[in-house]
Amino acid sequence: MVRVGIDLGGTNVAFGLTKEDGTLIAKTSVRTKKDLDAEALTDYIAESVFSWLKEQGINDEDILSIGMGAPGVTDDQIGEVVYTSNLPFYHTPAREIFHRYTKHPLRFANDADCAALGEMICGGAKGYKNSITVTLGTGVGGGIIIDGKIYSGFNGAGGELGHMVIRKDGEACNCGRKGCLEAYASATALIRDTVRAAKAHPDCAVWQLCEGDLSKINAKTAFDGMRLGDAVCTELVQQYIEALGDGIINYINIFQPEIILIGGGVSKEGENLLAPLREYVFRYTYGRDFLPRTRIERTVLGNDAGIIGAAMIG
Ligand SMILES: [Zn+2]
């Protein structure tokens, strides 16, 4: 028996087959046809998935479960994609549409929650039951796993890890508030701060690293400058780590998970990010001197986490 996981993204729909325990067997992807309306897009996804399964020699009888992670809010009780931020879904009855192709009920979760579940089943949090995965990309997203299950609140919209205020009246956030973690710890925020620092310090290493073109600055630039021994870049990285650390301290104080995984582009810095992050976090975490400590590590599955987690929802 196999499981089927679908990771619905704004550019691609990735899907794959796993063993019963979540081990990935095969995967593929199709472009997300953005010109279709939500129902036609759902039908196109189902058609793509089931014709690929046929090519793989998989019949409906071989399937144990099928799940989909979507970039927004889903309702697994009713079987709907309730809302997506970059795609046209709005109370779209995706389970019903999938029943044109399969007798199995399509299960749902948020895509970041699926990635967190995938990491717990086969990745960096394997062996643990309580974990938080934080993704540092365009925004700050992630998922909370409690006792082996996704926690997403009563309405499916919980676990928005990027939208907690860490600096009152701070930087404007996409959610409408000011000072959210996302406005300080996303790759986007780090790039914004690196550009600002370059403008304020004409002698700093950023100018040399971007060859005088500020549009070439990326989330790695400040770390590269720090490695060159530049004081402005070292300060930028320190501020970034403290902002991220403030968010992580809050997660630990609320949930005390066994492990927190950091993923996304900025996590590629590895120990350059994690070692000072741990140092900062454990300077302030509640109970730091008398309780076992939460581990802070990198994600390991990359994009496969979303497929695996979706396959393992049900
Ligand atoms: Zn926000």
Image (spheres, rainbow, N blue to C red):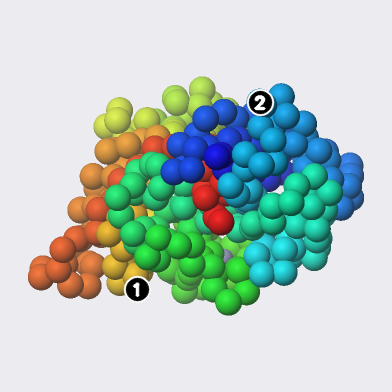
Can the viewer see residue 139 in this picture?
Answer: no
Q: Is mark 1 within 8 Å of ligand 1?
A: no
Residue 197 percent location from the top left of the image: 45, 44
Outermost residue, left direction?
Answer: 290
- Give whichever of 261, 217 is nearer the camera: 261
Q: Is residue 262 above or below residue 2?
A: below
The residue that label 1 is drawn on is 254
Q: Is residue 216 above or below residue 10?
A: above
Outermost residue, bottom direction?
Answer: 154
Left or right of 310 in this view: 34: right
Q: Are marks 1 and 2 in contact (CB under 8 Å)?
A: no
Corner quadrant of residue 154: bottom right
Ligand 1 falls in quadrant:
bottom right
The residue that label 2 is drawn on is 56
Q: Amino acid at mark 2?
A: Gln
Residue 239 percent location from the top left of the image: 35, 53
Neighbours of disc 1 within 10 Å: few (<14), some (14-19), many (20+): few
Q: Earlier in the sequence, mark 1 or mark 2?
A: 2
- Residue in the picture at 84% in, 49% down: 100
On the rendered image, what quadrant is the N terminus found in? top right
- Give whichever of 68, 285 is nearer the camera: 68
Secondary structure of the residue carrying numbered label 2: loop
Residue 202 percent location from the top left of the image: 45, 36
Measured in 3D between alpha carbons, the distance from the residue under mark 1 to the one under mark 2, in whole angstroms, is 44 Å
- Give whichever of 280, 63 is nearer the camera: 63
Residue depth check, mark 1 versus mark 2: number of the one nearer the observer: 2
- Residue in the picture at 80% in, 58% down: 96
Q: Is residue 168 above or below residue 136?
A: below
Neighbours of disc 2 within 10 Å: few (<14), some (14-19), many (20+): few
Q: Amino acid at mark 1?
A: Ile
- Give whichever of 295, 149 is nearer the camera: 149
Secondary structure of the residue carrying numbered label 1: helix
